[in-house]
Image (cartoon, rainbow, N blue to C red):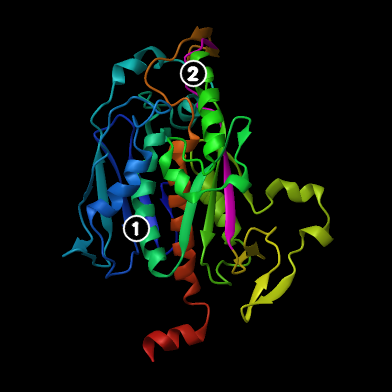
Amino acid sequence: MGGSTFGRLFKISTWGESHGKALGVVVDGCPAGVPLCEEDIQIYLNRRKPGQSDFSTKRNEADAVTILSGVFEGKTTGTPISMLVYNQDQHSKDYGDIATCYRPGHADYCFDEKFGFRDYRGGGRSSGRETIGRVAAGAIAAKVLATLGIKLTAYTRSIGEYTINYDNFNADAIMNNSLYMPDEECAKKASEYLKNMMKDLDSVGSSVECVITGMPAGVGEPVFDKLDALLAQALMSIGAVKAVEIGDGTAVSATVGSVNNDSFIIKDNKIAKATNHSGGILGGMSDGSDIIVRASIKPTPSIYKEQHTVNSNHEEIDINIKGRHDPIIGPRAVVVVESMCAITILDLLMVNATSKLDNLFKIYK
């Protein structure tokens, strides 16, 4: 199976299945000398682990990380960093009834067509638990970025029909509600809406937004490896993401150039922009303003309502999916979106280090 590796210089390879013995990631290309311990990783993993609220699966996993390599005396060595998280609370028997049928909204049918075989226990590699490796790697990337003055802030922007009011934006509120919303009033309304959907045995879609501050201008490759293109790839590779927007996103199709163009100004003796419709990216490169990216996430496909489908014998059937499932994906995906953005940004910063001869002089001459 290809496609489990992402990045060029800061490169990650995730491995493991939802109901296997463990999951993890190998991070290659991390610079030596980064202070790193398991607690640095655990803080991030705790944000995505299950069972923390009424709106996440009751699967009871500690998601405790072990660093196997690449760290010595509290600092990275420059060699591959391998990290592992054991699965401890699999209920594989819950999936026995669906071994020969295709769950609506899942990749079951596609796996069978591609490989002629699939791990039906929780989706295997297509399970949301695969993102453990992404988050562990993202924690490292975010720590490196912080030393460069680059900060990532991700949060739930919308749940169903409820979208945050930016006038009520409070960054401190993000970690103080189970939905990771920066608008406390919206979080309360969305919580009630979610409870009603759960009573109706249904799930809800959502969107996650990430704002990246402190980025220098000129990061990103102008053709195929554009910053926005790679951010889109990174976020679209998250299982439940169905659309990615940068800046004004799809709204640009209904505007005009005189409004959409961001005027350049001088602010504090530096070049800046009067507005940020571009979301911090022009021509595939960062323009020095905040990078704004958002991901639209589909409703959890595993719902308790009866659904119509077919089985591997080409018979039409009705199924009731058992197991433990999130009624919404967005809140637990917040840290995944943040992590994939961090990995992408750090990788392109490292690539960008070779874009000028002066940069080589600073290192070698």
Task: Tell me the quadrant of the picture where the N terminus can be found.
Answer: top left
Residue 301 magenta: yes
Q: Position of residue 180 (x, y in %)?
A: 46, 40
Q: Position of residue 75 (x, y in %)?
A: 23, 65
228 up-or-down from 197: above or below = below
Amino acid type of the residue that numbered disc 2 sits on in the rendered structure: Met
Q: Position of residue 300 (x, y in %)?
A: 50, 27
- Is residue 290 in view? yes
56 up-or-down from 135: above or below = above
Q: Nearer the viewer, residue 210 or 18?
A: 210
Q: What is the span of residues highlighted in magenta in the rendered image?
A: 290-307
Mark 1 or mark 2, earlier in chain: 1
Q: Nearer the viewer, residue 308 or 311?
A: 308
- Residue shown at 39% from the left, 15% from the top: 322
Q: Which residue is mark 2?
A: 198
Circle nearer the viewer, 1 or 2: 2
Q: Nearer the viewer, residue 182 or 12?
A: 182
> Callout 2: few (<14), some (14-19), or many (20+) C-alpha neighbours within 10 Å?
some
Q: Helix, strand or loop at disc 2?
A: helix
Q: Helix, strand or loop at disc 1?
A: helix
Quadrant in which residue 118 is drawn: top left
Q: Which mark is residue 1?
A: none
Rounded to the nearest angstrom, the CA distance separating label 1 from label 2 is 36 Å
Residue 272 magenta: no
- Is residue 2 in view? no
- Residue shown at 56% from the left, 29% from the top: 189
152 up-or-down from 43: above or below = below
| Image-based side of 251 in relation to 50, left or right | right
Amino acid type of the residue that numbered disc 1 sits on in the rendered structure: Ile
Q: Which residue is mark 1?
A: 140
Q: Position of residue 274 (x, y in %)?
A: 71, 67
- Residue shown at 75% from the left, 51% from the top: 252
